[in-house]
Amino acid sequence: MRLPFYFVSRSCRAAHWLRLSPFLTPGCAPSRHQRIAALTDQCKDERKYYITTPIFYVNASPHLGHLYSAVIADCLHRYKLLQGFNSKFSTGTDEHGLKIQQAAEAAGKDPLAFCTDVSGRFKHLFNSCSVSYTDYIRTTERRHCRAVEHFWSVLWNKGLIYKGCYEGWYSTQDESFLTPSQVGDAVDSLGKEIKISLESGHKVEWMKEENYMFRLSAFRSQLLDWLKGNPLAVQPEHFYQAVLQWLQNDLPDLSVSRQRTRLQWGISVPNDPEQTIYVWLDALVNYLTVAGYPDNHDQWWSAAHHIVGKDILKFHAIYWPAFLLGAGLPLPQTIFVHSHWTAEGKKMSKSLGNVVDPLQRSQIFTTDGMRYFLLRQGVPDSDCDYTDHKVIKLLNAELADSLGGLLNRCTAPALNPAQIYPSFCPQAFPREQGGRAVIEDYHMLDAVKNLPVVVEQHFESMHVYKALEAITACVRQTNGFVQRHTPWKLDKRNSADQRWLDTIIHVSFECLRIYGTLLQPIVPELSNKLLSRLGVPLSNRSWASLNFLPRYQGSDCPFEGNTLGPDSGVLFCRLENPNEDKEKTKKVKSQ
């Protein structure tokens, strides 16, 4: 029986985090580079985790969906590092194909120069949004071309690729071959009747040419066996069911090359310079390239997990596993599928002028703000809708007011003049009711104690939004705890009141520490600010450090009596809606 891939030795994790820099004091907020270095200094015997995004097509600048894929993968990568895994995170750009060739020609550029320019935009976006990839791959790199050529040769030598004649529909926009049932009639902008892909809506053309074919038809039963034996191989569930449904029909053999006269911009078929390897076979091999294929890929490839958009599910859940089975390689552990983003209820498109620029929005709403919004609102099972108003409303409510307000209130000099992590009084908050705590307070402690397990379950199934729902609910409970007991009204000259005041702040700090630790994969900069304000060193920010309120359990608290970190201002500044300001100005002028 295969162990769950999230299993890891807690003792090794603890040892790893104890080894981290002893020179970082609670009063010194670690830099981004120090935190990343701490996360990536792993135990040598830890289990590996390999997470990938799709490589993104460079025919146009990055959009919101690209950032969403990258942020999901980054979140899972950071989460695994916190658990002590040795994690590899790959993203990059897909740079071959007819669509790129045509886009470069239209721009009057050399294809490689065109690709380098657009790939640089993706890299800049990801770097700007704290996407901590460990490998950024471009399919024009020599290491990748070598991997593709070797992979092709393996399939060829096994008799799985043969020379044939392909005749059928082809979508240049999707770089995809289609069966007659996948094609429908439509009318273009000039009123001309055309054929389109029923799935994407893109124009298709009839193609007949001699090229190489992959024996996809031979793998239908093996693919069914794989899926039925691994019900979590494709998640969420309804995408898994969609793949099973596709496999109810026979699979036609797949064309895996194009004539060089039609497609020059790509990798040549080994020993046949008149043919170019099909862009999807080329692109999918990138995951192996990063793992070290063909020389040293076993240790990483056995831990592979893919993040993909629903529009490319068939390529990843049917074509890719069939290629891998043919090459005698293990299949990915999991294919996590997410849906798309719309803008104000409409599909984003240049013609509608509603394409959301993710870099611009991250500059307006902050990097962590955009990350939080995408992961809080993004539901993998169904399409999600973007509006600026939604972003502002969510971030103000949950980051500025609820979480930020709680931290600000509990660290305020009026309540905590000594600026320390105060003591917990077991008599004021006993394990059995009888002190000053009420039943709601005990419910809150249970919720926060169980929160790491709840969050872990949701992270493992890529339901990050559910993890954030659970965290947000606990933050509300903690705010209710503070509000209920009004510590600002207690008499500090009374020793019993002072002990209760210290206990309220101690419990609140412990809650905040748990929230800050769990939020690190989602909002790394904000979490660092929160934990640094509490004086929590890097060595106490791992998953192994999620021991909530040890004083309540009768154990020592390593933070009790420590000096808080410096006050670096509000945790998250409230956002203003520029459209609301315009409306107010209009109303004033009209009065």
Image: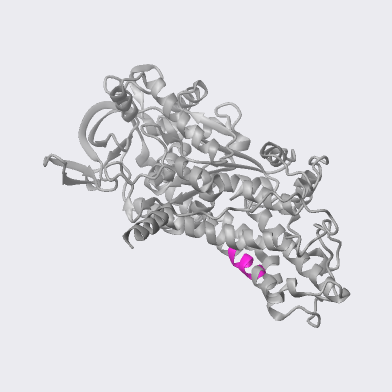
Residue 487: x %, y % from top left: 74, 72
Horizontal arrangement in the rendering, residue 22 relative to residue 582 (left or right): right
Q: Is residue 236 above or below residue 475?
A: above
Q: Is residue 230 above or below residue 286?
A: below
Question: Within the magenta stretch, is there residue 474?
Answer: yes
In the image, what residue occupies the spot 76% across and 78% down?
437
| Residue closest to the far right | 495
Foreground residue, 191 or 353? 353
The quarter of the displayed image where residue 582 is located: bottom left
In the image, what residue occupies the spot 80% across and 60% down?
417
Question: Within the magenta stretch, is there residue 147?
Answer: no
The quarter of the displayed image where residue 94 is located: top left
Residue 445: x %, y % from top left: 71, 70
In the image, what residue occupies the spot 31% across and 30% down?
99
Residue 377: x %, y % from top left: 47, 57
Q: Is residue 324 above or below residue 437?
A: above
**Helix, strand or loop for the magenta stretch, by majority:** helix
| Residue closest to the far bottom | 434
Q: How many marks?
A: 0
Color scheme of the displayed model: one colour
The quarter of the displayed image where residue 264 is located: top left
Q: Can I make out residue 528 in this image?
A: yes
Foreground residue, 378 or 218? 378
Horizontal arrangement in the rendering, residue 30 relative to residue 25 (left or right): left
- Which range is magenta? 472-478
Quarter holding the C terminus is: bottom left
